[in-house]
């Protein structure tokens, strides 16, 4: 039986390397790699892009756009991990758990825009509550989130690894730091569109000196629910129905919430190097905090791209992920 051919354009980047590692050893795909000397050769890239079943673009926005212009073969399907096409109506947004219909749309799509890392938790936590009529769609939602430094790509990785070297030589490491304070973060548009919220959330991202991992929190005062008395059990029940067939979503039962903690702490790195997202809910009568935890390079990037690849090529959705 012929293997599906997959080309990773941007095979040496953070996302591309993880995808290569995850596909290594699979007997159902043939990963096509471009020689080092040809990585910036447009003709060589075009030849690779046009002869495969699926191309995964692990490139910055502008470079991904250039790669798309090189594709002339209508049979080459594409997963783009860059930001620019995530809210483009001509592309299918690459987050399978949005709904069963959305999963089917990914299966049949020729163009899929892989989701961003921060939006995974926000969309999956909030969307079912709005759909169920429990959370007001006009609620002014806020997001407080922290990621490992690999989420910033090669430049941020270099900065933090240099800081680690300096720390060994006696200087302080980079502390917990907020960023994206001078303008709208690139993930806000997809958070807004696919959560079904009426207004864009206020988003405060941050980074710590850990390579990967991510925690996303969404505090919701009680007044923003559509009825009084909405509690953790109600949220868990709605999520349980929405994600009953979503094997990459792990739900924490509020009655057993201690299983999510390490001592008294909800750690950033529990799901690091994994491909699932964990959702939990906390709070009391004053309001609830929706929490998501994942690996920013796993379910937040490369792992999710593999999940979309599996759907598009007709494989079991979780192949190579669990």
Image: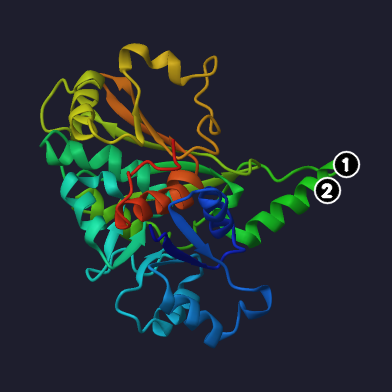
Q: Which residue is mark 2?
A: 166
**Kind of element beneath mark 2:** helix
x 59%, y 51%: residue: 150
Q: Residue furthest front?
A: 1
Q: Closer to the camera, 190 or 31?
A: 31
- For disc 1, the marked residue is 170
- The crowding category of the residue bearing disc 2, from other C-alpha atoms within 10 Å (few below 14, some 14 to 19, many at least 20), is some
Q: Position of residue 201 (x, y in %)?
A: 31, 50
Residue density around tag 1, few if under 14, some if 14–19, many if 20 or more, within 10 Å: few
Compute the Cα span from label 2 to label 1: 6 Å
* Image quadrant in which you'd find residue 186: bottom left
SS at mark 1 in the image: loop
Answer above or below: position of 198 versus 139: below
Camera sees residue 109: yes
Which circle marks residue 291 in the picture?
none
Q: Is residue 123 left or right of residue 80?
A: left
Q: The N terminus appears in which quarter of the rendering?
A: bottom left
- Residue 217 position, x and y percent, is 40, 36
Q: Is residue 226 above or below residue 115?
A: above
Q: Residue furthest bottom?
A: 43
Q: Residue visible at 52% across and 21% down?
A: 265
Label 2 with label 1: CB-CB less than 8 Å:
yes
């Amino acid at each position: 039986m012929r293997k599906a051919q997959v080309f990773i354009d941007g095979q040496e980047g953070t996302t591309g390397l993880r995808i290569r590692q995850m596909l290594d050893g699979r007997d159902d795909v043939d990963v096509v790699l471009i020689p080092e000397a040809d990585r910036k050769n447009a003709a060589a890239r075009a030849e690779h892009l046009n002869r495969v079943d699926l191309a995964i673009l692990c490139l910055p926005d502008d470079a991904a756009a250039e790669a798309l212009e090189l594709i002339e073969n209508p049979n080459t399907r594409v997963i783009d991990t860059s930001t620019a096409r995530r809210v483009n109506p001509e592309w299918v947004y690459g987050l399978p758990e949005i709904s069963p219909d959305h999963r089917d749309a990914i299966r049949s799509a020729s163009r899929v825009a892989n989701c961003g890392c921060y939006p995974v938790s926000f969309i999956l936590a909030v969307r079912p509550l709005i759909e169920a009529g429990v959370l007001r769609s006009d609620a002014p939602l806020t997001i407080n989130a922290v990621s490992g430094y690999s989420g910033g790509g090669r430049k941020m990785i270099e900065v933090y690894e240099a800081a680690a070297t300096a720390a060994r030589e006696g200087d302080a490491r980079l502390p917990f730091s907020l960023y994206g304070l001078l303008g709208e973060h690139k993930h806000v548009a997809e958070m807004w569109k696919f959560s079904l919220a009426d207004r864009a959330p206020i988003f405060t991202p941050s980074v710590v000196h850990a390579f990967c991992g991510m925690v996303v929190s969404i505090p919701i005062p009680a007044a923003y629910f559509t009825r009084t008395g909405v509690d953790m059990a109600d949220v868990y029940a709605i999520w349980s129905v929405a994600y009953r067939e979503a094997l990459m979503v792990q739900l924490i039962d509020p009655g057993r919430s201690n299983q999510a903690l390490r001592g008294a702490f909800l750690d950033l790195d529990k799901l690091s190097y994994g491909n699932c997202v964990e959702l939990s809910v906390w709070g009391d009568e004053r309001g609830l905090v929706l929490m998501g935890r994942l690996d920013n390079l796993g379910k937040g990037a490369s792992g999710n791209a593999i999940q979309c690849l599996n759907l598009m090529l007709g494989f079991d959705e979780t192949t190579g992920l669990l």
